Image (spheres, rainbow, N blue to C red):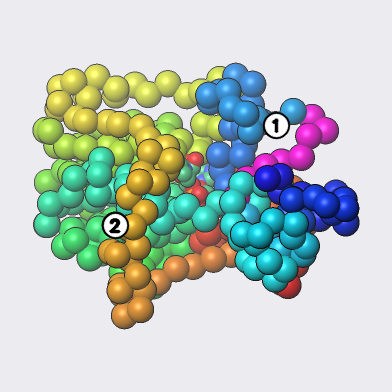
Amino acid sequence: MNIVDSTITLKLPEGSSDVLLKNLYLSCDPYMRNLMNKTQGTPSPFSYTPQSVIAGFGVSKVLESGNPDYKEGDLVWGFSKWEENSMPGITAYGGFFELGTPKKGENVFVSAASGAVEQLVGQFAKLHGCYVVGSAGSKEKVDMLKNKFGFDEGFNYKEEPDLNAVLKRYFPEGIGIYFENVGGKTLDAVLLNMRVHDRIPACGMISQYNLTQPEGVTNLAHIIYKRIRMEGFNSADFFHLYPKFLEFVLPHIREEKIVYMEDIAEGLENGPATLVGLFSGRNVGKQVLVVARE
Ligand code: NDP
């Protein structure tokens, strides 16, 4: 079966078994930048070339269907033309619980902490009985970490010239789990503050995606000295955990023990600026682009 994007084709051909979709909600995600880059990241069938349409996850409505499994008005999600990445939850869940292997009372540090994945990591860590500190790029975001998501502490990394000193202040006994999202200077300072046999689930390194020459990490040898387990992952590695993830997360959402913050931008014409905004921290929470509400 083919999925036909309604922005390209407005009517299914006679006798077609395809589904005609109208895109409603599209996602803006940092990984999209990597897919535009010839020198970084893994080549992927979804890599973008000039003049091609950006692809990603999204939510769409079935306008017309020649396929018996779908009927007009159904809402569907999946990978199509620039659409929603509905996976920040499974990224946070798999990265934190499977790779972080947290224990109650451990010290957790989360960078880019107000973001789509990270706000959930912080809340999962609190529900697990950990002490959690997050860094973010504005006072508004830091307040949100503490007052909305229940982090124990937060700081604005843009106002802290000495990240090593600030981490020592918040983690006098060292960091147990660092949920890595930014790379660069932050990772360098974290490596000085990790303890022996602790873990770094490496989710992303957003500070590096726009650089033609990635920054060096001078303290990398601490991975050896401290026997740190640093492991990169892709959210797809954890898709098999989806039922377990829902079983964990849904009761907490119903009881309002997990909250979620979205940043909604309106209109496909605002897509490029919205995507670029991720790299200056313009978004507050998960960035969604609304193309149409119905
Ligand atoms: P976010 O919602 O967190 O948006 C990105 C945020 O990153 C911005 O709001 C900004 O917040 C922060 N940021 C941007 N540039 C920098 C910088 N130079 N230094 C420090 N922080 C910066 O996006 P996501 O939660 O979707 O993604 C966060 C990370 O997780 C990214 O690295 C992404 O690639 C990765 N990721 C990985 C996945 C995987 O499968 N491995 C899946 C999804 C995401 P601030 O104002 O705080 O600077």
Task: Give, as a single range, the part of the protein colored magenta.
Answer: 50-57
Tag 1 secondary structure? loop
Tell me residue 148's x, y (percent): 39, 72
Q: State the residue in front, 254 or 223.
A: 254
**What residue sits 22% from the left and 25% below the top?**
223
Which residue is drawn at the image coordinates 65% and 68% (left, top)? 74
Q: Is residue 278 visible?
A: no
* Amino acid on which the number 2 mark rests in the picture: Lys
Q: Nearer the viewer, residue 275 or 155?
A: 275
User: Would residue 34 appear left or right of 116 to someone viewing this image?
Assistant: right
Answer with mark 2 or mark 1, whichever residue precedes in sequence.
Answer: 1
Q: Please say whether residue 145 is one of the residues in the magenta stretch.
A: no
- The N terminus, quarter of image: top right
Quickly name the residue at label 2: 244
Q: Quick check: 73 left or right of 116? A: right
Q: Main secondary structure of the magenta part?
A: loop
Q: In x, y percent, where is residue 65?
A: 74, 60
Name the quadrant containing residue 136.
bottom left
Q: Nearer the viewer, mark 2 or mark 1?
A: 2
Q: Is residue 246 left or right of residue 130?
A: right
Looking at the rendered structure, the number of numbered marks drawn on it comes to 2
**Amino acid under disc 1:** Tyr
Instruction: Out of 99 and 78, give the one closest to the viewer.
Output: 78
Q: On screen, 288 above or below 182?
A: below
Q: Residues within 10 Å of mark 2 (few under 14, many from 20)?
A: few
On the image, the x and y values in percent for residue 56 come to 63, 45
| Residue ranking furthest to the bottom | 255
Q: Quadrant of residue 142?
A: bottom left
Pointer 1 residue = 48
Q: Is residue 75 left or right of residue 135?
A: right
What residue is shown at x 24% (from left), y 19% (from top)? 221
